[in-house]
Image (cartoon, rainbow, N blue to C red):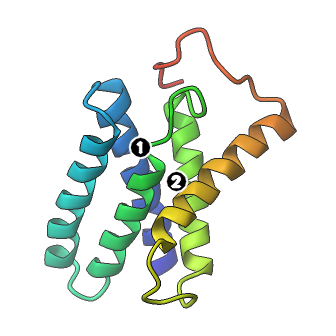
Amino acid sequence: MENLYVILVSVLAGCATYTISTLMGKGAVFGSAVVTLVSGIVFPYFFPTLGPKLAIMATCSSYGGMVAVKNVPRLWEMAAVGFIAGILFIVTDGAYVGVGGKLGTIAAISCFSWIGCKKLFGIKETPKEPLESQ
């Protein structure tokens, strides 16, 4: 059940960052900062045992949410990137503990993986309305 929460938080945090930065036009750094700050306060408070891990996952996924619109033009695509980030986070949970750059690396691999999936399955690169949430 813990892994399900991690994946859910990953998808929601990535989509929240993407929404703030792209759809609201506030910028990627601001969007990531808001999601990271809110999750760092809320999750440990409401979920004392699992909260810190969820806050870390939200931070990781918020880095993925900073992706350029030309690479991930739709909100549902950002949800897919968040899902991939959640899976990678679960798989690498015990690896390289305390080594810097792990969260950003997971986010980057998630974005690259999604771009590769789009090319592999022939998903259009840019829709007519790039900020549409279809």
Residue designated by label 1 = 15
Q: Given the current orientation, which residue lies at the most extreme top position?
A: 128
CA distance separating discs 1 and 2: 7 Å
- Element under label 1? helix
Provide residue 70's location: percent of width, then percent of height.
57, 26
Provide residue 38's location: percent of width, then percent of height.
18, 58
Q: Nearer the viewer, residue 8 or 118?
A: 118
Residue 79 vertical placement versus 91 (above, below): above
Residue designated by label 2 = 82
Q: Residues within 10 Å of mark 2 (few under 14, many from 20)?
A: many
Residue 84 vertical placement versus 57 (above, below): above
- Element under label 2? helix
Residue at coordinates 23% horizontally, 63% vertically from top-left?
39
Dot placed on the residue nearer the N-terminal end, 1 or 2: 1
Q: Quadrant of residue 17?
A: top left
Type of amino acid under label 2: Gly
Residue at coordinates 83% horizontally, 30% vertically from top-left?
122
Residue at coordinates 47% horizontally, 84% vertically from top-left?
99
Q: Residues within 10 Å of mark 1 (few under 14, many from 20)?
A: many
Residue 27 vertical placement versus 134 (above, below): below
Provide residue 134's location: percent of width, then percent of height.
54, 24
Residue 28 vertical placement versus 49 (above, below): above
Task: Tell me the tag on residue 102.
Answer: none
Residue at coordinates 42% horizontally, 88% vertically from top-left?
98
Provide residue 71's location: percent of width, then percent of height.
60, 33
Q: Is residue 68 left or right of residue 57?
A: right
The answer to whether mark 1 and mark 2 are in CB contact below 8 A is yes
Residue 97: in sight, yes or no?
A: yes
Q: Given the current orientation, which residue lies at the most extreme front position?
A: 100
